[in-house]
Image: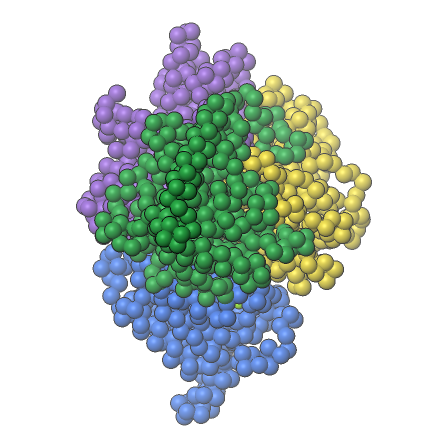
Chain colours: A green, B yellow, C blue, D purple
């Protein structure tokens, strides 16, 4: 999560300097839950549909950092060769599907990947995770996707970051239930709730949920409560977030909380922490530099192929 | 005509592909023991119990699931109960499935079966033709079989294709259209149109059920000495402009016929391609005949006046011959 | 509900005789809940989005029987003049919206009607009801519609007939929760459950739910358990319904149960019952006869107007 | 150019209509205190607190709600955050709203605002043009304002119309396009095209942002002595064939330009109507220029090569003049 925070801070300042192609959407405050999830999953074995605020999870899952910087900086070497960008990058064959923007739409895709593994006799010990926000819970796709996973009893872990806002919309304009975890029972899935600002608690609850899914417990819904500590994107100053909320326990920064937890528990030292941070800074610097040196996509070089089957191309 | 129906061919193609290819599975409402609303999957669940799965009434998730399974190397067939209900899966079809290869390089070999088109008494929500809507979006293959053998082979070929295919099967043809043999003797690849009747005075381009109306119209005009060429597009994307233009080169006249709504769509694309690329071949203004610009009406009296028929096609051809 | 049963039996036999335009979808076994709901609502004041098996509710709500027979028999005098048919008929201005086939889609329409009344200051004492089946609960539209009603705290009563099948699909392929009423908490709405084969219980639970909505309690989800006593439509022999289920308490016929209840409670006499039935038969006979004598739609008479604004018509 | 922007006009039209008509309300994501993702509703919630409502992320329900409210006599404006997200409301738009008047005789006066079209770095899901998809379905009015005054008046007129309107506003024009006055002095009704530049050598038919690219191309060709007529369709359904054909009658040559995907759609409809109804007016094959048949790419280098531009339109006109 240190890496993610460092990378995203860098991306945010590159955005302000006008160096980024397109928008920047970052996840400060959500690194604890995202990285907890990513660290429970194995690249090339499990599935993780990362969403808008999942740099922490992507890194922990094993996504190379260059994939991120290439995507943001518009390198033609990026996973989609400039055809899509930022958080839409993915490496589906490695278990990291490439998201479309329509919220909720990736849940059923993950379920389909899991169903395929079952049909192929390869589901044993596999977990598929998907992230969604509080706003995404209002989509029909969320409902259909989770319900279908429940009917098929697939090992899906749905990490729901209730960060109190969907863009500017507060939760009371999004849903009327007391607690989103109360949705679990209606789908017949197991529900978990956690304070998403608390790193150790997040790691515990999320890893338990992943374990339950892995061992055949069916879909798991994990609701993490926290606050989005940035704007919706870097273009947004989030002035609509009330001060009281920022100062409430929900507004704690999971990074600070996490560092203190690890230091207090004697799991790391201040020196180690500092060296992690400087390593992260170096790694980020290198990945940014590499991507910046790489060529941009060239429309004359791109093959513009939309069909995999060459015989389908028309010349009109 | 023989005893093999269009829907037999659809069932049989699925059977054969399930048999030959372990990567194929069927997912859809009531496709299991019930055999599907139109019986297109009858008996398949018994033979392939793990690979014929009843889905909840969740069209959006059905397509999302299929895309996910395709990423993992499977080749799902999704049965929509009616083409009309794919409207709630529209996003997953046009934004998820259609764009995936372009975005990621990973192909999505899914086949979505769309029971399409009108039958009397079906009304606005069980009669739609949706090929034009999907053809608009880049990345989708749209096939519209009009014969029993095409129903068979084009389904087999659709499933074999590495790209997402919308297989538009016409409900009116299900049991009405019969042939002696399931597989015929004139298999063509997807993307190639077929000249189903040769002629020299005018070309009628049609697809799906309208091919048969067009053939009847051509028959009736032949009594008056007119030789009308009929082209069955077979797939509307890719669209075989070459065959159409070659036909117009012979006849000099074009009528494009569709059962769909009149704004845009297949007939506009055909006419505008011919006008752009084959302008000097035309001896008369190219014409179109579509259904009316209203929802498909329920009552058979209205329904018959809504879509092109033998009579209205014949009238349109006569008009074209006079232009 | 006697009228509904009588009408639908007649329609079913007309269907078998080939006298019906299109399909016939009837609701035997569901008259108790449907009529209970309809009888709690006032025509021209409340809203009722009747669905596929709601003849009972339509009649109780006040829909003229001729609207039904005209629709099924293809009279041009039907509400949609033959443009749509059977259960798709509606009289939106009287509070009976005309359903589209796509399941779940009417819930948000009812919510919109209620929202309009609120904006117009006319919501006081109004209730909007919508029917759905167990299968419809899997649609995204169901989820979005109910959630939006909950966010707006609208007086919506959602009557969910869990009749064990969606066409041929049994509930275990539709959802994985133990009880659909458990969904209520996840939307923050009030949930009620009732044995839908039991007329008096249905009347009690449904009228309480309607009352709660009317007095400002927000959306109410009523789950009625029962069995569909017909095929999906009259073309379907429903041979997939297991005998054990038919013989279980769920398989009871609400008409028989209801008659016995009323007789036992001394609320009606056998004579009254018999005369109700013969009155219903006469009424049905008359409505069928009238509709049968009426002209069918004539494509040359129909104006084929799809826009209300005449200036929008094109001549191409 | 002045200081009033295209998006100012959209905001102002909504303000004025909210002011004048109690039946109007706005429903959409973040349209309330936040003023909308593009600030098209800025300040309106303060002025009309009960009639500017934030919705959940539920596009299907948003349109369903609007239809219900319209049945009860209201005139809702729905803001989609991006046109692309209307794909999940597709069913309610094309099957519920569009068919309602035909089915029941009760009109549905709703206006759905679709922030449409490409801007650099927006990618496949924030750049789509959806006018052709909706124009296919009977019962929908599709407007595509290209000027500040049209943005204002066509929104006012859309809301006043008793039928469902998809108001396709182009995001690229939001702040780029400026005028001296909000209301201009050339108000035309919906359904009427405008000749925005007179000429005699060829007609370019365009709409939305492409009108400006076409004008730039016409300007640049005027230096070579070519006089190019440019027609702004303004609404793509109804489509003003008369004005287009009258223009072609003067010029003898037609190029239809769209920023949308190339299969079917507005340019096919325009070309095929002119070919059918104005064939003898054409001195050369009518041509089309559309975006490429791939999803809209994210990187600006690719994006600029995906849609028509000054350069590619100029080249297409030159080619047309040689045909
Ligand atoms: C179907 C759909 N509608 C609208 C949007 C536009 N949009 C993108 S992110 C967002 C807010 C998402 O909120 P939430 O799910 O809570 O995630 P968060 O941004 O808080 O992490 C919206 C409205 C979208 N992407 N998809
Ligand atoms: C979105 C959608 N998908 C499929 C259908 C086809 N269909 C019509 S009724 C039905 C079954 C409905 O089951 P349920 O909701 O339980 O209602 P019931 O028929 O049992 O009363 C299906 C699948 C439809 N109408 N809408
Ligand atoms: Mg959020
Ligand atoms: Mg049911």
Residue pictured at 55% horizontal, 63% vertical: A217
Q: Quadrant of residue B219?
A: top right
- How far across and how far down the image is residue A131, in percent? 46, 50
Where residue C241 sits: x, y (%)? 62, 72
**Does residue B231 appear in the picture of this structure?**
no
D304 lies above or below C262: above
Query: Is D67 situated above or below B161?
Result: below
Residue C294 shown left or right of residue D33 in the figure = right
**Quick one: C138 or B307, which is closer to the camera?**
C138
Q: Is residue D323 above or below residue D279?
A: above
Left or right: C97 as drawn, with respect to C284: left
What's the residue at 64%, 50% (across, down)? B77
Name the image quarter holding the N terminus of chain A: top left
Relative vertical location of residue D221 with respect to residue B112 in this rendering, above or below: above
Q: In the rendered picture of this protein, how many numbered marks are placed on residues?
A: 0
- The picture places residue A211, in percent across and down from the top left corner, at 53, 59
Q: Nearer the viewer, residue A38 or B238?
A: A38
Q: Could you tell me which residue is drawn at 60 percent across and 81 percent down?
A: C247
Q: Position of residue A241 (x, y in %)?
A: 26, 47
Q: Residue at x 55, y 67 (%)?
A: C171
The residue nearer to you, when weighing A229 against C309, is A229
In the rendered image, which quarter contains the C terminus of chain A?
Answer: top right
Q: Tell me if I can see residue C188 in this picture.
A: yes
């Amino acid at each position: 999560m240190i890496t993610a925070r460092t990378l995203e801070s860098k991306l945010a300042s590159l955005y302000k300097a006008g160096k980024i192609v397109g928008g920047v959407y970052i996840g400060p405050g959500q690194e604890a839950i995202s990285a907890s999830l990513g660290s429970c999953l194995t690249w090339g074995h499990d599935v993780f549909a990362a969403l808008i605020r999942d740099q922490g999870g992507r890194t922990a899952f094993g996504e190379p950092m260059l994939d991120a910087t290439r995507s943001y900086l518009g390198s033609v070497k990026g996973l989609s060769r400039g055809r899509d960008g930022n958080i839409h990058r993915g490496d589906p064959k490695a278990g990291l599907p490439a998201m479309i923007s329509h919220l909720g739409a990736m849940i059923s895709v993950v379920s389909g990947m899991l169903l395929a593994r079952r049909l192929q006799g390869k589901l044993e010990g596999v977990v598929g995770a998907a992230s969604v926000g509080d706003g995404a819970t209002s989509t029909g796709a969320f409902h259909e996707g989770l319900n279908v996973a429940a009917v098929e009893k697939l090992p899906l872990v749905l990490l729901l970051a209730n960060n109190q806002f969907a863009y500017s919309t507060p939760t009371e304009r999004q849903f009327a239930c007391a607690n989103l975890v109360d949705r679990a029972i209606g789908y017949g899935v197991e529900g978990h709730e956690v304070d998403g600002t608390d790193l150790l608690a997040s790691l515990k609850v999320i890893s338990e949920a992943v374990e339950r899914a892995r061992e055949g417990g069916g879909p798991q819904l994990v609701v993490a409560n926290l606050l989005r500590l940035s704007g919706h994107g870097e273009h947004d100053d989030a002035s609509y977030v009330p001060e009281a909320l920022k100062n409430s326990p929900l507004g704690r920064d999971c990074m600070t909380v996490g560092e203190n937890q690890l230091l207090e528990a004697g799991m790391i030292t201040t020196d180690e922490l500092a060296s992690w941070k400087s390593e992260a800074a170096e790694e980020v610097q290198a990945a940014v530099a590499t991507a910046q040196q790489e060529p941009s996509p060239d429309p004359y070089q791109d093959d513009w192929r939309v069909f995999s089957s060459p015989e389908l191309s028309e010349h009109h | 005509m023989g005893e093999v129906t269009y829907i037999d061919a659809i069932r049989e193609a699925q059977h054969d592909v399930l048999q030959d290819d372990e990567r194929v599975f069927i997912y859809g409402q009531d496709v299991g023991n019930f055999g599907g609303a139109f019986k297109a999957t009858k008996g398949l669940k018994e033979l392939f119990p793990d690979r014929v799965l009843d889905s909840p009434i969740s069209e959006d998730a059905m397509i999302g699931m299929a895309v996910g399974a395709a990423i993992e190397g499977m080749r799902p067939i999704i049965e929509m109960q009616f083409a009309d209900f794919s409207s709630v899966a529209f996003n997953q079809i046009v934004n998820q499935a259609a764009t995936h290869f372009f975005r990621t390089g990973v192909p999505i070999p899914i086949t979505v079966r769309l029971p399409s088109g009108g039958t009397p008494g079906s009304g606005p929500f069980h009669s739609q033709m949706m090929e034009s809507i999907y053809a608009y979006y880049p990345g989708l293959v749209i096939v519209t079989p009009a014969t029993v053998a095409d129903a068979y082979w084009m389904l087999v070929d659709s499933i074999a294709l590495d790209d997402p295919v919308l297989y538009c099967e016409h409900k009116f043809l299900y049991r009405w259209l019969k042939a002696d043999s399931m597989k015929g003797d004139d298999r063509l690849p997807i993307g190639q149109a077929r000249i189903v009747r040769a002629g020299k005075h005018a070309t009628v381009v049609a697809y799906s059920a309208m091919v048969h109306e067009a053939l009847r119209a051509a028959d009736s005009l032949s009594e008056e000495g007119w030789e009308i060429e009929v082209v069955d597009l077979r797939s509307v994307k890719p669209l075989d402009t070459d065959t159409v233009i070659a036909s117009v080169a012979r006849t000099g006249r074009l009528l494009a016929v569709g059962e769909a709504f009149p704004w845009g769509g297949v007939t506009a694309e055909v006419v505008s391609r011919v006008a752009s690329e084959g302008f000097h071949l035309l001896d008369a203004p190219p014409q179109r005949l579509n259904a009316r610009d209203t929802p498909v009406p329920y009552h058979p009296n209205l329904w018959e006046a809504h879509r092109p028929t033998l009579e209205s096609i014949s009238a349109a051809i006569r008009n074209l011959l006079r232009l």
